[in-house]
Image (tube, rainbow, N blue to C red):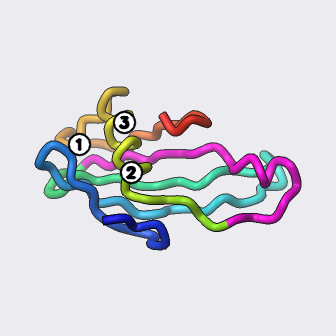
Amino acid sequence: MANSRSNAGTVDLDGLKYDWQLQREPQWSDDDGWKGMTVSLLQRDTQRAALLEFPPPKRLLKGLQRGRLQLDDATVARGVRAALVAGWEPMSRGKPMVFTVDAEGN
């Protein structure tokens, strides 16, 4: 099920459910310039969240208007897999782990 216009949802990977929620849309910062969106991830019935920080859309860097937010289950699923490969352990305790997503979405 695609959640292309939603700010939250659930993806199912390998029989586990991961809840996601948009934490921040792309925004301008006087100190850092454009910052990309941030999405939080949490495996159901676990404690440790992950935060995916995406780069700002290229159109914003070029001075164009903000386009429609492009966030769907496939993007979130790739982010979950990348976070798990990078060391996210949802069953562990602690602060949310932060992962920076590259321009290709990995």
Q: Which residues are magenta?
A: 48-67
User: How far apart in space, not on screen, are marks 3 and 2 (Cα)?
Assistant: 14 Å
Identity of the residue furthest to the right in this view: 63
Q: Mark 3 vs mark 2: give the one in front.
A: 2
- Front tag of 1 and 3: 3
* Residue shown at 15% from the left, 43% from the top: 14
Residue 34, x across and y down, in percent: 76, 51
Closer mark to the observer between disc 1 and disc 2: 2
- Secondary structure character of the magenta stretch overall: loop
Of helix, strand and loop, which one carries label 1? loop
- Secondary structure, mark 3, is helix
Q: Residues within 10 Å of mark 3 (few under 14, many from 20)?
A: many
Residue 84: x and y in percent read 30, 33
Is the residue 83 above or below the residue 58 in the image? above
Residue under label 1: 90
**Residue picked out by circle 3:** 83
Which of pointers 1 and 3 lies earlier in the amino acid sequence?
3
Circle 1 crowding by C-alpha within 10 Å: few under 14, some 14–19, many from 20: many
Q: How many numbered marks have been drawn onto this rendered protein structure?
A: 3
- What residue occupies the far top of the structure in this picture? 86
